[in-house]
Image (cartoon, rainbow, N blue to C red):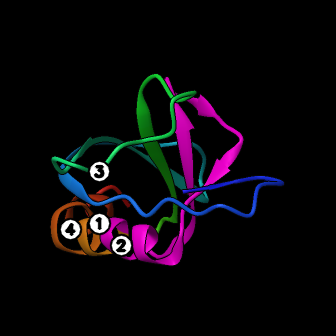
Amino acid sequence: MIEYGNPDIRELRFARFRSRAEARSEQWIDVEVSLELEKGSEAPEEIVELGALIVCTRRGDIVEIVPQDEGRDCEYQFTEQEKAQLRTYYEQEVRPTVENMR
């Protein structure tokens, strides 16, 4: 994770994902993802409940992946490796459901 304004980077590894997809509009689908970290991987102290919001088009294409704390935006961003883990999960587990929401 990368904190805005801080040069230090903390690379997280995710062990488990749970998600819920919901149509936000005619154009967007929000996928809220609960994250469980691998043993030895620790989120920053300030984060109480780490999650992610994956914003997708109705076709299922990812537009944005943002970290959340307790379901709200936070002062962090995911690294490219963390986003890659989330993209892999999304493509394998969530995208078929999103594509059926059309």
Task: Choose mark 2 or mark 4, whichever is in front.
Answer: 2
| Residue 95 seen in render | yes
* Quadrant holding the N terminus: bottom right
Which labelled disc corresponds to residue 41?
3
- Whether 82 is among the magenta residues is yes
Residue type marked 3: Ser
Q: Are marks 3 and 4 in contact (CB under 8 Å)?
A: no
Q: Secondary structure at mark 3?
A: loop
How crowded is the residue under tag 1: few (<14 C-alpha within 10 Å), some, or many (20+)? many
Give the residue drawn at x 16%, y 63%.
93
Which labelled disc corresponds to residue 96?
4
* Image quarter of residue 33: top left
Q: Which residue is mark 2?
A: 87
Residue type marked 1: Tyr
Residue type marked 2: Arg
Would residue 96 appear left or right of 7 to someone viewing this image?
left
Would residue 99 appear left or right of 3 to someone viewing this image?
left
Residue type marked 4: Pro
Task: Choose mark 3 or mark 2, whichever is in front.
Answer: 3
- Quote the CA–CA distance across marks 2 and 1: 5 Å
Q: Are marks 2 and 1 in contact (CB under 8 Å)?
A: yes
Q: Could you say where residue 86 lies in the image, as x and y percent from the top left?
A: 35, 65
| Residue 60 seen in render | no
Q: Which residue is mark 1?
A: 90
Could you say which is closer to the camera, residue 88 or residue 5? 5
* Quadrant holding the C terminus: bottom left
User: Is the residue 35 above or below the residue 6 in the image?
Assistant: above
Which residues are drawn in magenta?
Answer: 59-86
Q: Secondary structure at mark 2?
A: helix
